[in-house]
Amino acid sequence: MSAHQPLPTYFVPHGGGPCFFMDPPMGPPGTWDRMAEFLRSLPADVGTTPRAILAITGHWETDDLRVTAGTNPPLIYDYYGFPESTYHLQYPAPGSPALASEVAALLSAAGFPTVEDPERGFDHGVFIPFLVAFPEAKIPVVELSVRRDMDPTAHIAIGRALAPLREAGVLIVATGMSYHNLRGFFSADPRMTEAAQVFDGWLTAAVCDTDPAERERRLAAWETAPAARLCHPQEEHLLPLMVAAGAAGSDAASHVYSDRVFGKALSGFRFG
C-alpha cells in the first residue's frame, strides 16, 4: 500500500429501494431531491479520485465477514414491488480482487476472519446511491458485509482495522439510513416523527463528539439512546456507521447531510 493523504470516511443514506430512478417518484415530488443532491456532492467533497471504494451496507449480513472479490460483480436487485424499469438499472463498476485481498488480510490480522467471495454482486445499498454519486462507474468497488450478530463494538473494531486503507487511496463509504423503521417511515403518527427527531439529535451529538473515545463509547451503546428501537427495530441500516466511525480513528466528524423524508429526520456524516 502506497502512502497518500488519508481520505475521509462517510456514512451516507442510500434512500428507499430505487427511489432516485422512479417515474412517477415514490412520495410527493421532491421527496428525494435533497438526498440525491447530497450524494452527487460526494466526489467534490472527497476532493480527489480514489483508487477504489470500499462500501459497507447492511443489505449483506453474514456470520463471518465476507468481501466481494470478483472482477465484474453483478447487481442484486434486492427490492420488491417497484417498477419494472428499476430491475434493469446497470452499474458496471469493476471489482478489485486485489483490494478484496487487502481487506481480508487487514481484518483477519485483527481477529476478524474474512472470506473473499468471487461470486457475490452489489446489492442496492451500493449500486443505487453510487449510481447517483459516482455515475460513470469507473472507480473499482468492493463491498464488505456486516456481521449477523450486529455487535456495535465489533463493527467499530472492524472499521479500526480498515483504517490503513484510507492512506492507500481507498474511500470507505458506509451506506444505510440513520432512521429505518419502515412502518414508522410512512406513518403520519406525530409520535413517530418526534421519535425520529429525538434519535437524530442524539445520533448527531454522539457522532460529532470531539473526544474520539467518547464517540465510540456512545455509539457502542446506541441502544440506550432515546427512541433507539423505535427508529431501528432492526439495526442493520445503522451498523455500517460503526465501521465508518472506527475507520476514522481520531479524526473529527461533521454532520454533512440533514433532511426530512416523509417527515422523518435523516442525517449523514463525514469523518476526516
Image (cartoon, rainbow, N blue to C red):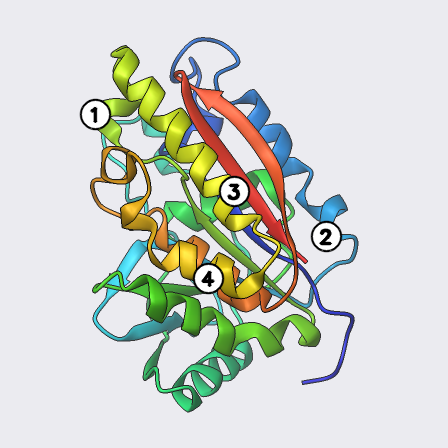
CA separation in Å, label 4 and label 2: 23 Å
The Cα atoms of the two marked residues, 4 and 1, are separated by 29 Å
Q: Give the Cα separation between the discs numbered 2 and 3.
A: 23 Å
Element on which disc 3 rests: helix
- Residue at the spot 65% in from the left edge and 37% down from the top edge: 40
Q: Residue at x 46, y 87 (%)?
A: 105
- Label of residue 46 in the image: 2
Q: Earlier in the sequence, mark 2 or mark 1?
A: 2
Tell me the residue that label 1 is attached to.
183
- 57 lies left or right of 182: right
Rounded to the nearest angstrom, the CA distance separating label 4 from label 3 is 12 Å
| Viewer can see residue 83 | no
**Quadrant the N terminus occupies:** bottom right
> Which residue type carries mark 1?
Arg
Tell whether label 3 touches label 1 (CB within 8 Å). no
Q: Residues within 10 Å of mark 1 (few under 14, many from 20)?
A: few
- Residue count near mark 4 (Cα–Cα under 10 Å), binned few <14, some 14–19, many ≥20: many
Nearer to the camera, 77 or 203: 203
Secondary element type, mark 4: helix
Asked whether 83 or 150 is in front, the reply is 150
Look at mark 3 in the image and give the residue it sits on. 205
- Badge 2 amino acid: Val
Tell me how far mark 2 sits from mark 1, CA to CA. Answer: 34 Å
Circle 2 or circle 3, nearest the eye: 3
Q: Earlier in the sequence, mark 4 or mark 1?
A: 1
Q: Secondary structure at mark 1?
A: helix
Q: Which mark is residue 216?
A: 4
Return the disc, 4 or 2, that comes first in the chain's sequence.
2
